[in-house]
Image: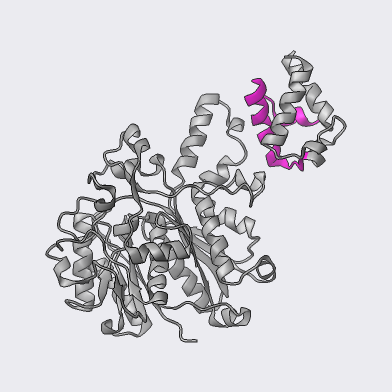
Amino acid sequence: MGIYSCIGKNLQEVKESLYAGKSGIIFDQNRKDFGYRSCLTGWVEEPNLKAQLSRRERISIGEEGAYAYTATIEALKNAKIDQEFLDANDVGILYGNDSTARSVVESVDKIREKKDTTLVGSGAIFKAMNSSVTMNLATLFKLKGINFTISAACASGSHAVGMAYYLIKSGLQDCIISGGAQEINEFAMGSFDGLGVFSTHTDPTKASRPFDQNRDGLVPSGGAATIIVESYESAIKRGAPILGEIIGYGFSSNGDHISTPNVEGPAKAMKMALKQANLNPSEVDYVNAHATSTLAGDANEALAIAEVFGDKGPLVSSTKSMTGHECWMAGASEVIYSMLMMEHSFVAPNINLETPDEAAKKLNLVNKTLNKKIDVFLSNSFGFGGTNSALIIKKCKQ
Amino acid sequence: MNKDLIVEKINYFLVDEFEVETESIEPKANLKETLELDSLDFVDLVVAVEANFGVKLTGEDFLNVITLQDFYDLIEARMA
């Protein structure tokens, strides 16, 4: 695994932030100047890749690609994968991403100004396409397996991990670099802010408060998270540490409103994942909720979790209370957050949860760090258009 | 713009933007080999020339450009 996020630039930093309940949310003056209603965001600086990549490589990689590259370098190292292994095996890439707004805006602005498409430069197209992350990483790491981007709004990263799992399980691939990336800039989230669903809380660190009755919206965020998904045999053969085993990937589509989530769709995805994992609901120790801190979304997810697991079921928290909503990245990053909790035997808190709302009272919510052994967790991710994904991962006993 | 300034500007962006080693830059150096240019890089050369000299070139303008000296001469001719 590897991560580059607003609560840490590597696994160690992220683990410490999760344990400490540290928020990565800031006030962004650029958003104020740009006309945003809410100026809060999770923030991490864009990595400077000058030392690692050539000019040709750098000019084709956008902001989200730079995050993804950095997270992937850490993931490959931790998985004991070097270039020799990548050259000798058909390693694939399935990564979640659903926008490249800054690259698109900057290139179109340049063409408008110059009235000449050549003057946009050679890197613009490779930064502006939605598959920017996978096309760049597949080239940089010389990958020869499956190679495409999964766009499924805020469930993109989760579906990427799930699809990687299915391909490994089917025997079509042995090793896939999966994950999710999310750009952080004022161009990316303006239209989302326009819906009035972002928090306008005055204290950035208190703004993201999933399940709290005084929540007033989500806080956008970003970065990238990479998870190496591979067959047991492939990992053993290389002597790689096996951090966990994916045992369920449930999915569904709400067939309902474009932005308002419902209860049935998420519940269906969770039930599908449980059935696939051959688990009773009581065997899940922890649920990392999708809960973004919106009124309807959190309440409906709470009802869905309660429907699947019963009242006061497994421990539940939303790490978005610390990270904000990492959107296209979230499904992958939240698997990593949960994996870190499982590895280090704790449940990260749902910070800012002071007064659970009516629906959330049905859940066994954790609002303070809990030292607790976790063997199995479920991670929820939902997105616009009613796309739902639920992943179940268990500790691997080697 | 005199020729010395043209040469200075070209050399500067070759080093600064295209990351060409300073010691590789000499008038007789083969442009493709020195810059390790591929078709995409020619697009960026057009961008750099426009930004530095306000001259719009096309890929075809580079057809007869073999050495750095040819490149200097091309810009000088277009600036005249």
Q: Quadrant of residue A96?
A: bottom left
Residue A228 location in percent, x, y? 52, 69
- Residue A332 visible, this angle: no
Quick check: is A231 in the magenta stretch? no
Which residue occupies the foreground of this view, A68 or A2? A2
In the image, the segment drawn in magenta is: B35-63
Residue A164 location in percent, x, y? 49, 70
Which residue occupies the foreground of this view, A75 or A247? A75
Which residue occupies the foreground of this view, A168 or A370? A370
Q: Is residue A305 left or right of residue A398?
A: left
Which residue occupies the foreground of this view, A169 or B45? B45
Residue that appears at 67% across and 65% down:
A83
Magenta stretch, overall SS = helix
Residue that appears at 54% across and 61% down:
A72
In the displayed structure, would residue A99 be above or below residue A353?
above
Q: Is residue A273 left or right of residue A71?
A: left
Quick check: is B49 in the magenta stretch? yes
Q: Is residue A354 left or right of residue A69?
A: left
Residue A211 location in percent, x, y? 20, 61
